[in-house]
Image: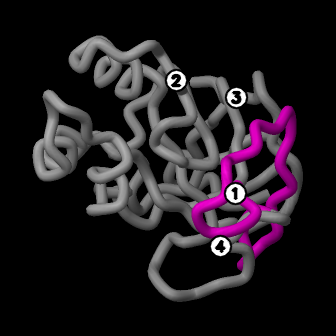
Amino acid sequence: MVVERLFLSPARGETQRECRQLELLAGQGVLGDRHFAKESWAGQQLTLVEAEEIERFCAHTGRPDDLSLTRRNVVTRGIRLNQLVGRQFRLGACLLVGVETCEPCRTLGRRLANETLSAPEVVKYWLGRGGLRANVLISGHVACGDTLTLIEAGEGAP
């Protein structure tokens, strides 16, 4: 249960920047990201995706591995993110809560479509595999190599 890669996108449509560390602010999200301090939908503060799902998609479609292709902020390895909906967890120095699964959108479908896989087929493929939307409860930094630790019932926030 480790952070493999970190990304932010300063503006809509702009190329993602890979980072060694992200600063997360409670109630606002990733400092410098296009969604910072926005509240257009639940869980907009931070998105996570499993490296294993990206690698599976790349193998399925014959693409080279590219852990940035879903445009999520945090790429994890070794944990099923769908199980974190409604759960609190620590990521680096931060406390987060899983809000909902991060289902694929038409934009992802269009971006990953090619001559052998249509945009609707991309969206269908990523259903249930697109990751997790989370909110930041306690501010801090997250770095590559940090671990993700579940908060057990009754443990509460630090």
- State whether residue 120 is above or below residue 77: below
Q: Are marks 2 and 1 in contact (CB under 8 Å)?
A: no
Crowding at label 1, few (<14), some or many (≥20) Cα neighbours within 10 Å? some
Q: Are marks 4 and 3 in contact (CB under 8 Å)?
A: no
Distance (Cα) linking label 3 and label 2 = 21 Å
Label of residue 35 in the image = 4
Pointer 2 residue = 66
Task: Specify the quadrant that holds the N terminus.
Answer: top right
Distance (Cα) linking label 1 and label 3 = 23 Å
Which residue lies at the image location 15% right of the left edge and 34% below the top edge? 117
Q: Position of residue 59 (x, y in %)?
A: 30, 12
- Residue 129, quarter of picture: top left
Pointer 3 residue = 147
Front position in the image: 116 or 22: 116
Which numbered disc flags the more N-terminal residue, 3 or 2?
Answer: 2
Q: Amino acid at mark 1?
A: Ser
Q: Position of residue 63 (x, y in %)?
A: 36, 17
- State whether residue 101 is above or below residue 41: above
- Residue 20, quarter of picture: top right
Say which of marks 4 and 3 sits in front.
4
Q: Amino acid at mark 4?
A: His
Q: Amino acid at mark 3?
A: Thr
Q: Amino acid at mark 2?
A: Asp
Whether residue 83 is visible, yes or no, is no
Which numbered disc flags the more N-terminal residue, 4 or 1?
Answer: 1
- State whether residue 108 is above or below residue 150: below
Pointer 1 residue = 9
Q: Secondary structure at mark 4?
A: loop
Q: Secondary structure at mark 1?
A: loop
In the picture, measured across the screen, residue 134 lies left or right of residue 10, that is: left
